[in-house]
Amino acid sequence: MKLWERRFKDRKEDPYLEEFNASITEDFFLFNSEIIASKAYAKALHEAGILSDEELSQILNGLDKVIERVKAGVEARKYEDVHTLVESLLIDEIGDVGKKLHTGRSRNEQVVTDEKLWMRGRIIGLIELLKELQRTIIKVAEENFDVIIPGYTHLQQAQPVLFSHYIMSLFWALERDKDRLLMALKGLTSSPLGSGALAGTTIPIDRDKLAKEMGFRGPTENSMDSVADRSFILDALFAISMIAIDLSRFTEDFIIYSSREFGFLELEDHISTSSSLMPQKKNPDFFELIRGKTARFISYLTSLMVTLKGLPMTYNKDLQEDKFPLFRAFTEIEEIIVVFNKCLLGIHPDQENILRKMASFMLATDLVDYLVAKGIPFREAHGIVGELVYTAQAEGKELKQLSLDEFKKFSPAFEDDVFEIFDFRKSVERKKTYGSTNPEFVRKQIEKAKKIIS
Ligand code: ARG
């Protein structure tokens, strides 16, 4: 059924083309928002003198009946989009009065209003999910607080760090992701409704009141901008992509760390799978899928950016393509956060094996600092230790295997106490800066994190 069918005489529908034009399968998720916005709009029409008291209550009741009918099941595919569906069912239910609801209104403004209403709830839900994951991170950090791992740069062992420090680094990334979601939420504070198709309407709608009725702070400022704008979706898609990217980075670590070559992490069986051919396999499929699916979010963001970049003002049907990335991104990111959360609880660091893999070369920087403490200028100390590392490696030795005499060949500043350097735990404890891996600072970090999410 078409709301505009009388524009044509004997228009013969080509079902294939009609289906191509329709968006009902992609925008039905906006149904509840469409009802909220329609009720608010009916009230605004009533205020504007278009609907009598009686007509308003008929429309409001009619919209409730539409909800019931949809719950009972309707053949949604008959309708072009969710806006058409609601209006058509309303007219079915209450007859001619229903035909007044669209006075001065355009689907161009309805669609953005619905999207903003829908996104509001979903963003808040997403922030809650992220908080839950942050709680899990804290739990995992506390349970493995003292475990020491190699910290990497360039995927080369760099300096020892606490596992708790490492895993807490994800907490702060997610904290920024939450901030980005809050910023996206701020972009949803103004209501487009009352903008008409693009130019506003002759019906004296009190847009401010209408906006507040739907929980917006106020109306948008420019009717043309209102119907053409989709940047509020891009903001959310970027925030969502960043969540996926942040989780993906860590799944990459977990995948590598659980390999035989590393053997740092033991994965519980229920977060592992095996092979149909190779019976020995224990595969980190869930983490791989999160890493793999991250590509989708980036594509949702890019696809909408590309849709927008060449559009003439104002509404163009291309904009109908915004629903797919919007709905998919919100739905799929929730799934990914839940899966990540469950799997994070199933990873267990193997301290013994980790220590076996940690080379004492990772303490070379500590050795430099040792010489600096003995009064040697940093650049000189750095050079001395560089030569030490070179020589030890050439001789196939670890730094700690050199004798004091050998150390002294490189600098007379080396004394007996040099061997105290070769202790990963002490190395971690020697860190003095706020935000460092020093256990005291990590404890403070966790306390602060707890406060943030409480
Ligand atoms: N289904 C359309 C969309 O999602 C609604 C707006 C239609 N507007 C129009 N002028 N055809 O974009």
Image (cartoon, rainbow, N blue to C red):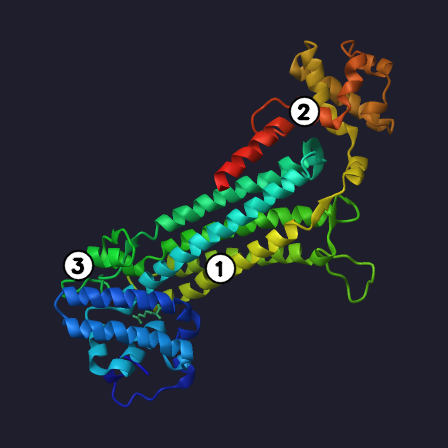
In the image, taking residue 235 as reference, residue 168 lies left or right, namely right
Q: Which residue is mark 1?
A: 329
Residue 382 visible from this viewpoint: no
Q: Residue at x 39, y 46 (%)?
A: 183
**Occupied quadrant, residue 282:** bottom right
Mark toward the viewer: 1 or 3: 3
Number of numbered discs overlaid on the protein picture: 3
Between disc 2 and disc 1, whose residue precedes? 1
Looking at the image, tell me whether mark 3 or mark 2 is earlier in sequence order: 3
**Compared to 22, does 172 lie above or below?**
above
Of circles 2 and 1, the one toward us is 2
Q: Quadrant of ligand 1?
A: bottom left
Return the x and y of residue 303 as percentages of the image width and height: 46, 60
Residue 254 located left or right of residue 389: left
Q: Amino acid at mark 2?
A: Glu
Is 97 positioned to the left or the right of 168 in the image?
A: left
Q: Where is 250 relative to 371, above or below?
A: below
Question: Which numbered disc, 1 or 3, marks the residue that appears first in the sequence?
Answer: 3
Question: Which SS class for mark 2?
Answer: helix
Q: Amino acid at mark 3?
A: Asp
Beta carbon at label 3 within 8 Å of ligand 1: no
Residue matched to label 2: 429
Disc 1, SS: helix
Give residue 227's quadrant in the image: bottom left
The residue pinned by badge 3 equals 206
* Residue 49 coordinates in the image, percent (x, y): 12, 68
Q: Residue extending furthest bottom? A: 10
Instruction: Determine the CA span between mark 1 and mark 3.
Output: 34 Å
Give the answer, above or below, for where 267 lies relative to 3.
above
Mark 1 belongs to which amino acid?
Ala
